[in-house]
Image: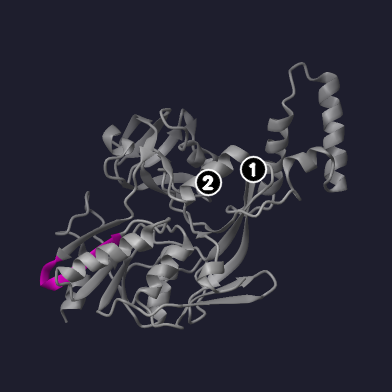
């Protein structure tokens, strides 16, 4: 794949899911519109597949036709069979999408969001969903959902490691429909019903702090983030900002090209920003193609929920000596998924590459170690500028 920006296709990074719902968070995905019929439902239905699968399915089909008393829905049965087959790979980020699911996945990647309006962390191994943040003016905020709530049930079904991905996706849905969540808030168990709506998402919050320090919070790296980042930076600079804080705590990722575009505003032209390696060991080195527009001291705030595109962003700035990283070690999501739309509208997402920082430091299962480690107090109920020890340390660093 060429490193030229015009030839780079969208790369999506997800594991903290935005249940606007943006993407399944913490998954780096390459999205392509190229249509292929090689593995479409129609082909499998016609028997153009692995012989063993054909034989087994044909045998089961015969038994069902002979004995099952209900109606057989071929489309649903085939979709379910493919989902199970792909799930058998054993990779939590590799999955099959039905045509409806694929359209939803693609639209959220491109910035069209319908949902309840929360950022989530999905733990696949232990089977839980935590609310990382609630969007402003969202249905979730109106219904009373709060940051740090742990979702226990979705529409009455208890979340386990076996169904956590399915139920995380189930929180999504059509505009105007409702979802009932059972959540744990400290020692209290609550039931909250939320109506799904179309959500206008802002990817960036910004403000001027003391001593001409500009503050930009990047909530995700979905479509349009880099342009919004540029606009907010230019406004802060016009107000007199002489240094910059970029806060990507709780940011689980998004479109990798958005992170690359932001890096090009900061790093020198021809700087290495990211190294990707496929299953055959073939490398692609992505370098900055633009001259930087930001030339001031920068500190990047990270935490354990900063993942994928966030780690690409922080790792590149750290290795290129363009920023000081403060906070706690990042999540450690360093693999990329390719998302392919098939000819029948369905899609296959599969892990195809691993990425590392410009200094060739691995990220997957490791994370980015900050230059300065600062923990947040464990007993705070709501993070504010007054009790945010990480932000305070960042301001101190920029005052030096």
Which residue is at the far top?
A: 69
Mark toward the start of the polypeptide (2 vs 1)? 2
Q: What residue do we see at 14% from left, 59% from top?
A: 386
Seen from the viewer's position, the closer of residues 44 and 368 is 44
Numbered circle sitting on residue 105: 2
Is residue 23 in view?
A: no
The residue carrying pointer 1 sits among few (fewer than 14), some (14 to 19) or many (20 or more) residues within 10 Å by Cα, namely some
Numbered badge on residue 103: none
Residue 211 in the magenta stretch? The answer is yes
Residue 163, image quadrant: top right
Report how far apart the C-alphas of labels 2 and 1 lie in the structure. 12 Å
Q: Is residue 284 left or right of residue 225?
A: right
> In this rendering, would 162 be left or right of 376?
right
Q: Main secondary structure of the magenta part?
A: strand
Vertical order, 234 against 111 (above or below): below
Q: Residue at x 52, y 49 (%)?
A: 124
Spot occupied by residue 126 in the image (x, y as percentages of width and height): 50, 48
| Badge 2 vs badge 1, beta-carbon distance below 8 Å | no
**Quarter of the figure with residue 64:** top right
Q: What element does badge 2 sit on?
A: helix
Secondary structure category for the residue under label 1: loop
Residue at numbered disc 1: 345
On the rendered structure, is 261 left or right of 334? Answer: left
Q: Is residue 381 magenta?
A: no
Front tag of 2 and 1: 1
The span picked out in magenta is 209-217
Residue at point 47% right, 59% down? 255
């Amino acid at each position: 794949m060429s490193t030229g920006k015009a030839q780079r296709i969208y790369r999506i990074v997800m594991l903290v899911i935005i249940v606007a719902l943006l993407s399944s968070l913490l998954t780096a995905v390459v999205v392509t519109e190229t249509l292929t019929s090689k593995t479409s439902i129609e082909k499998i239905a016609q028997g153009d597949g692995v012989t063993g699968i054909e034989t087994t399915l044909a045998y089961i089909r015969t038994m069902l036709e002979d004995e099952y008393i209900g109606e057989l829905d071929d489309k649903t049965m085939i979709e379910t069979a493919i989902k199970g087959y792909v799930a058998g790979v054993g990779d939590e980020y590799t999955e099959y999408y039905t045509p409806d699911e694929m359209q939803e996945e693609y639209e959220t990647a491109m910035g069209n969001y319908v949902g309840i309006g929360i950022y989530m962390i999905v733990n696949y191994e232990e089977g839980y969903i935590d609310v990382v943040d609630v969007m402003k003016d969202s249905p979730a905020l109106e219904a009373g959902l709060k940051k740090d709530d742990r979702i226990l049930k979705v529409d009455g079904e208890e979340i386990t490691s076996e169904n956590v991905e399915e139920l995380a996706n189930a929180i999504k849905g059509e505009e105007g429909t409702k979802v009932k969540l059972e959540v744990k808030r400290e020692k209290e168990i609550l039931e909250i019903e939320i109506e799904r709506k179309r959500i206008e998402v802002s990817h960036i919050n910004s403000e001027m702090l003391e001593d001409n320090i500009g503050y930009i919070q990047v909530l995700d790296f979905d479509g349009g983030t880099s342009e919004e980042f540029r606009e907010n930076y230019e406004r802060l600079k016009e107000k007199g900002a002489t240094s910059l804080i970029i806060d990507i705590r709780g940011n689980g990722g998004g479109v990798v090209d958005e992170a690359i575009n932001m890096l090009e505003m900061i790093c020198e032209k021809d700087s290495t920003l990211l190294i990707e390696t496929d299953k055959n060991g073939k490398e692609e080195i992505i370098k900055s193609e633009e001259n930087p527009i930001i030339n001031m001291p920068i500190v990047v705030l990270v935490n354990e929920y900063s993942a994928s595109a966030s780690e690409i962003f922080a790792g590149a700035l750290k290795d290129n000596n363009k920023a000081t990283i403060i906070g706690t070690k990042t999540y450690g999501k360093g693999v990329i998924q390719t998302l392919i739309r098939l000819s029948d509208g369905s899609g296959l997402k599969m892990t195809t590459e691993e990425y590392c920082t410009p200094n060739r430091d691995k990220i997957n299962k490791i994370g980015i170690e900050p230059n300065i480690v600062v923990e947040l107090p464990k007993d705070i109920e709501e993070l504010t500028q007054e009790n945010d020890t990480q932000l305070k340390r960042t301001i101190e660093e920029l005052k030096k």
